Amino acid sequence: MDDTIAAIATAVGEAGLSVVRVSGPQAMATVDRVFRRAAPGRLAEAPSHTVHYGWVLDPATGQPVDEVLATVMRAPRSYTREDVVELSGHGGVVAGRRILETVVAAGARLAEPGEFTKRAFLNGRLDLAQAEAVLQLIRATHEAAHTATVQQLRGGLSAVIRRARERLVTAQAHLEVGVDFPGEGHAVWSSPALDEALGAVEGEIAGLLTAAERARARIHGAVTVICGRPNVGKSSLLNALLRRERAIVSPRPGTTRDTVEETIVLHGMPVRFVDTAGLTESDDPLEQAGVARSREALAAADLALWVVDRSTPLTPQDAAVAALLAPRPCVVALNKVDLPSQLAMDAVRALAPASPVMPVAARDGQGIAELEAQIAARLAPPQPSEPRAPWVTHARHEAALREAHAAVRRARAALAGDQSPELVAVDVREALDQLGTITGETASDELLAAIFSQFCIGK
Ligand code: GDP
């Protein structure tokens, strides 16, 4: 990392500002070649964390390129831990690019995607899990993903992994003393103490795996299955929720044969709504297939939204649907409240005693906001007992945790079975390596390249 890199760090387009970031040992010297500071003095002599007003000039022609503020951050107190200059110029498609071209002409190299963050990682300012959090933060499209990611960026996950790795390193050291000096009177750590240490690591990893499950719903969307007998207004309700036409609405019963799925963000949390074809038996083979799919969807659901048509009396089919829903959390949408009621509320309550009943009219949107609030409240996962508990939001991290968990369990089994310390050590080493891929200590160059190539240029 002895060269100096540059890139536009802001999104290109009509905007108030565009920022060109320059990082590397020659950052100040390079910018000094093209920057005319209003006050006397060069950036190369400027103290760290100071801002300087002036103009970027084309060194060949002396023509002004843009009016800028140059921020100087000296190593190691910068994003990359290198010398950094950020040039804030005018926004727009052209201004940032012109500044960048000028800085490159003055000796900087165009940065590759993610190269600033990669340098921050290689210089030890961020570990790999934190670097990945940066990427996820840039991509977060809803509040829940943002919260989880900020927690990861602050090092919540990294701290737990580091602690577990320290324990494993100690365990391994003791095991290897046993390996290296068999029978020479060196005290090998006693099995119970070793097992206790490994047990603690196993528990910590198990906690992280639970966190991964919690995060999955928050990040990728909890599943709500919309159920009800034909024609009660399931598709219409999904449409009302989407506020756009996507599901096929038909006045004929049973025409939505397949499941329709849409994700919407409710109260900052993504929710995947699945409209089911029908849950109750039918003679039509096509519908039977739909019934099977609907039941599968329901089995995997976090919440059921049972739709009842208030303008007709309850039928045995309604009761059959209610019976299928009974074991899972449920919200009842009492639909078509714009029509005269033909339905006794008590009868609905009797079929779904533990579920809130929300009056709505899918057709005109009445009550939809209240229904959404109720769904969001029901789906909000229990907060972790400790507010700073780490989030596990990457499938890659979860996979490594599973491998590490299995390896620790194998190590404990080997220990319990009086296996040789060498054998126990193999599994401890495996667990260490797996955990190290999360924070980056044991990540291969290929893995690093794959991760950083997902970044945008300038980050
Ligand atoms: P599904 O079979 O349960 O998906 O029901 P649909 O969404 O296809 O709706 C069946 C019929 O009920 C359609 O004619 C809808 O226009 C009508 N419908 C749905 N919601 C309402 C509502 O809130 N009020 C009234 N009056 N009609 C509705």
Image: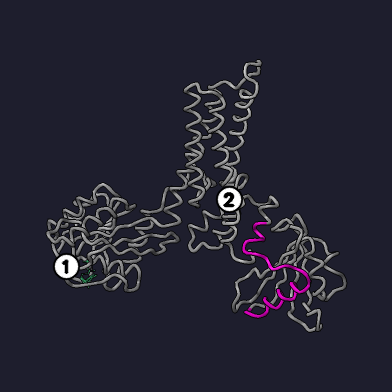
The magenta segment is 92-118
Q: Is residue 371 left or right of residue 2?
A: left
**Quadrant holding the C terminus:** bottom right
Quadrant in which residue 49 is drawn? bottom right
Q: Amino acid at mark 2?
A: Ala
Please tell me whether residue 64 is drawn above or below residue 175 in the rendered image: below
| Residue 355, magenta (yes or no) | no
Please tell me whether residue 264 is drawn above or below residue 203 in the rendered image: below
Visual colour scheme: one colour
Q: Amino acid at mark 1?
A: Pro
Location of residue 173 in the rendering, given as x and y in whole percent from the top left corner: 63, 29
Estimate the spatial distance between the alpha carbons at disc 2 and disc 1, rounded to whole Å: 51 Å
Q: Is mark 1 within 8 Å of ligand 1?
A: yes
Residue at image position (81%, 79%) is 59
Which is nearer the eye, 313 or 223? Answer: 223
Location of residue 419 in the rendering, given as x and y in whole percent from the top left corner: 51, 23
Mark number displayed over residue 129: 2
